[in-house]
Amino acid sequence: MRSSCMFLQIMVILFITVTNIGAQTQPLTNKKLLRPFNNTISALFVFGDSTVDSGNNNYISTVIKCNFPPYGRDFLNHIPSGRFTNGRLVTDFAASYIGLKELVPPYLDPKLSLEELMTGVSFASAGSGFDPITAQLSGVIPLQKQLEYFKEYKRRLENAIGEERTKLLISKAAFLVSAGTNDFLVNYFSTQFRSKTYTVSAYQHFLLQHVQQFVQK
């Protein structure tokens, strides 16, 4: 159990490390790229917390925002986009490497084009976690709500390109989930909502159950 939790935490640390190293100074465009290798990945869908939130928190009522300097100082036009970093996120680098696009936009952006929707979006919300209480503490989007947004996304796509094309696109898509840190830092170690009831190992098990449920859904 401990090794499983450590694996999740290590993955988050790797995401943060790559994100901070990956500040770029050259201009970016979000047009579709030439693919560097022969792959069949159609889109990238992202769920989680601030490690992969590309700006969804800009569109909800919460204090957990970063749409102000010095965030974004190495981003396109030095604009704070809502990403909790100085430049791009690991998901942006992943989409670029796959050859989809340079940036993975937030799903709640009302200006998203059909091409943006078809090549992938982020449903993540900074401050969220697998434990539903974690998101409540910060007034952000819980993982379960992110899944509801994904279902809404599928309906939007079906209305635009048809059910069969939507099924094919999603069947060839990649999914990335990055969460868990806030469950411990914001929730377990900062409040008594869970620490009164669970030991650390019991809470790890509790979170892993939520991870399993999330993946199954």
Image (cartoon, grey):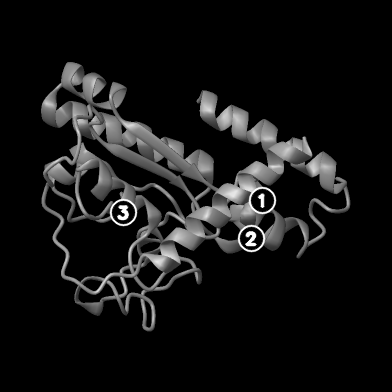
Where's residue 73, x and y in %? 32, 79
What residue is disc 1 on?
Answer: 133
Q: Secondary structure at mark 2?
A: helix
Where's residue 30, x and y in %? 15, 56
The part of the image, by quadrant, that contains residue 25 is bottom left
Neighbour class for label 2 at 10 Å: few (<14), some, many (≥20)?
few
**Left or right relative to 19: residue 132:** right
What residue is disc 2 on?
Answer: 137
Mark 3–mark 2 Cα distance, whole angstroms, equals 28 Å
What residue is disc 3 on?
Answer: 92
Viewport quadrant of the N terminus: top right
Residue 46, compared with residue 136, is above or below; it is: above
The kind of residue tagged 2 is Leu
Q: Secondary structure at mark 1?
A: helix
In primary-sequence order, the first of circles 3 and 1 is 3
Neighbour class for label 1 at 10 Å: few (<14), some, many (≥20)?
some
In primary-sequence order, the first of circles 3 and 2 is 3
